[in-house]
Every structure is written in C-alpha cells, then in structure tokens.
Amino acid sequence: MAIFSCNGVDIIYEVRGSGPRLVFHPGTLSDLRVPPTIFDSPLAKHFEILSFDPRGIGQSNSPDASPEMSDYADDLQRLLIHLGWQSALFIGESFGGMVLQEFALRYPQLVQKLVLVVTSSGGIGGASFPLHEYDIESMTTNEKVDFWICSGDRRMSSPDDIHTLPELYIPLSNYYSKVCEISENKNEGALCRLRQLKARMGHDTYERLPGLNRETLICGGRYDNIAPF
C-alpha cells in the first residue's frame, strides 16, 4: 500500500495486476486491510487495478468538517493525476457508486466505461438506506455487526433472522467484525465516519444524469436493502 497526500487529505491506495486500467471505488464500510477486497476477485487476473480507502474510510483521514461528494470526486481525480493515469475503466460499489456518478459528471474525459453497483442517484431518483439516522458510533461491536448485516440484506432484516442463514451470516459477520474492530483504533475515526455519512446524505445527481455520456452498466442486488433494485 502507498499514501497520497494533497490539501491535508491522506489517501491510502494500492495498485496491482496488469492489463487494462481499472479503478474500483469501495463502499461505506471498507478497508484495504480487510479481505475480501477487489484484489481477491476474478478481476485481479485481467486488469491493472487501483483501489483505495476514500477520505474518512479505512486508513485515510478526513480533515474537512463538511466534505461533499465533489470533494471525494476531486480526491480521486488528484490521485489519478499523481499516478499518471489519463483514463480508466471504473467500478463503484454503493457509496463508491455515488462518488463515481459525481466523478464521471465532473471528469468525463477520464472515464472510458462505468459500472455502478448497488447504488443510487439520490434526489427524486431515490436515496439509499438512511444510515445517518442511526447512532452507529454508540453501538457495541456486536451491535454494529448485526446492524450492518440487517441493513444490507433483506433476507436478514432483523436480529431474529440473522442466525437462520448461517452460510450468509458467518462470512458477513467475520468481515464486519474485523472492519469495526480495527476502525475503533483509528484516531478521530468516529468523526471521520460521521463526515463520510454526512456527504453520503447530501448525494443527489439525479437531474444531472442525462449529461453522463459514458457507457454505463447498472447492477442491482435482488436482496439489497441499502439501495433496493
């Protein structure tokens, strides 16, 4: 992993593989240190992949009091300039898909093709699950794990349901437990995460999407409770 610093923002990133260049923007609860990441996917055999911890997520900081989606998009643009990537393919998952909508509208010349996975446009096009309405930071680690599982998958929509599908619950529980545990040791981690959720709350590209003139694949999840199909 490497670090890119600009305007007080420290972005942790990683580049692996060979082939066409692909940028993967992860979702709200992610950390490059916790597998599975995009580098554990089949795509790793076919592309040169850039992924990173966006500001406020994982190991990256979030120094601005009220970051907006445009700030996340600008962070990525500066990172690409730093790496000398003039264009790439892009995949955005959940929160990452929100940022990439903003990014593609602001910097279309950098985008070859775009994949938006389990995400939303905001505005009258529909918003994602209102994570900002929950006091996540006051929860215990176990409560956080169950919250993220229940809010993400309609098959396990309450704590009473999560143990009825152990083949789904166990890998999700292991992942969220690890992310939540290591995030608790991050300086100003709670503040960083709250700032990220605030930016997520203000996301709205709906009226501007007709101007997104790049070939785009939109993927929804049949049981997704964050951004329903």
Image (tube, rainbow, N blue to C red):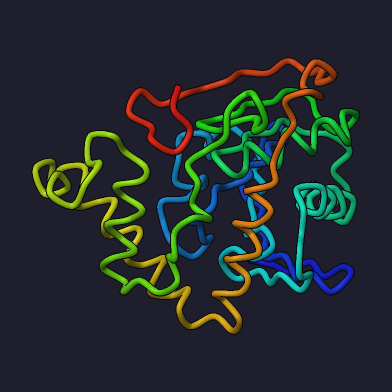
Q: Residue at x 50, y 46 (%)?
A: 130
Figure quadrant of residue 88? top right
Q: Residue 38: horizontal and vertical position, in percent?
A: 51, 45
In this view of the protein, which residue sits in the foreground, 214 or 128? Answer: 128
Quick check: 61 left or right of 146?
Answer: right
Q: Residue 10: horizontal and vertical position, in percent?
A: 75, 70
Q: Residue 37: horizontal and vertical position, in percent?
A: 48, 50
Where is 110 relative to 82, above or below? Answer: above
Quarter of the C terminus within the rendering = top left
Q: Residue 160: horizontal and vertical position, in percent?
A: 12, 49
Q: Residue at x 80, y 29 (%)?
A: 111
In this view of the protein, which residue sits in the foreground, 75 or 24? Answer: 75
Q: Residue at x 76, y 70 (%)?
A: 65
Where is 218 relative to 117, above or below? Answer: above
Where is 30 relative to 115, above or below? Answer: below
Q: Residue at x 78, y 37 (%)?
A: 102
Tally the marks. Answer: 0
Instruction: Name, please, the residue furthest toward the left.
Output: 164
Quarter of the N terminus within the rendering = bottom right
Where is 53 relative to 188, above or below? Answer: above
In this view of the protein, which residue sits in the foreground, 76 or 44? Answer: 76
